[in-house]
Image (cartoon, rainbow, N blue to C red):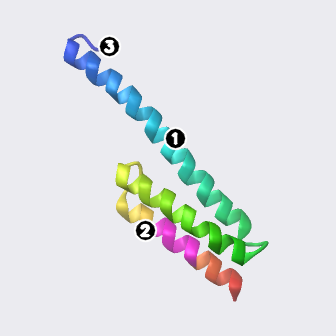
């Protein structure tokens, strides 16, 4: 456990940041799941929700929840899945 005052304050700050990070990651996973769920049924709806998924992915990458290459890989695979479903 933290002993010094600085360590206690850092621990409090990390707990607050943890809440934001968990919320951001949950938003990311739900957005990606929504797109994946829509791909087999209607590609038009999937394309519309793709922008929200891109936004969630980019925000997670910006906050450092996922890495930049992971974000680009996720976006690329979602777009490729929609393209495959169209064909």
- Residue denoted by label 2: 72
Relative to 56, is 77 above or below?
below
Secondary structure found at label 3: loop
Relative to 53, is 4 above or below?
above
- Residue denoted by label 3: 1
* Chain part drawn in magenta: 72-79
Q: Judge by depth and name the residue closer to the eye, 45 or 34.
A: 45
Q: Quadrant of the N terminus?
A: top left
Image mark for residue 23:
1
The CA distance from mark 3 to mark 2 is 38 Å
Q: Earlier in the sequence, mark 1 or mark 3?
A: 3
Where is residue 25 shown, x and y percent of the image? 51, 47
Secondary structure found at label 2: helix
Where is residue 8 shown, x and y percent of the image? 28, 16
Q: Residue furthest top?
A: 3
The residue located at (40%, 27%) in the rendering is 15
With 72 as the anchor, is 87 left or right in this view? Answer: right
Residue 76 on the magenta span: yes
Where is residue 54 shown, x and y percent of the image? 50, 65
The residue located at (55%, 68%) in the rendering is 51
With 38 as the anchor, is 72 left or right in this view? Answer: left
Q: Earlier in the sequence, mark 2 or mark 1?
A: 1
Local packing at callout 2 (Cα closer than 10 Å; few below 14, some 14-19, many 20+) is some
The CA distance from mark 1 to mark 3 is 25 Å
């Amino acid at each position: 456990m933290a002993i010094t005052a600085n360590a206690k304050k850092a621990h409090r700050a990390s707990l607050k940041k943890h809440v934001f990070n968990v919320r951001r990651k949950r938003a990311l996973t739900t957005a990606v799941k929504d797109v994946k769920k829509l791909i087999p049924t209607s590609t038009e709806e999937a394309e519309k929700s793709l922008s929200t998924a891109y936004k969630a992915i980019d925000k997670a990458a910006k906050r450092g929840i996922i890495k930049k290459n992971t974000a680009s890989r996720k976006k690329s695979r979602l777009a490729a899945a929609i393209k495959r479903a169209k064909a």
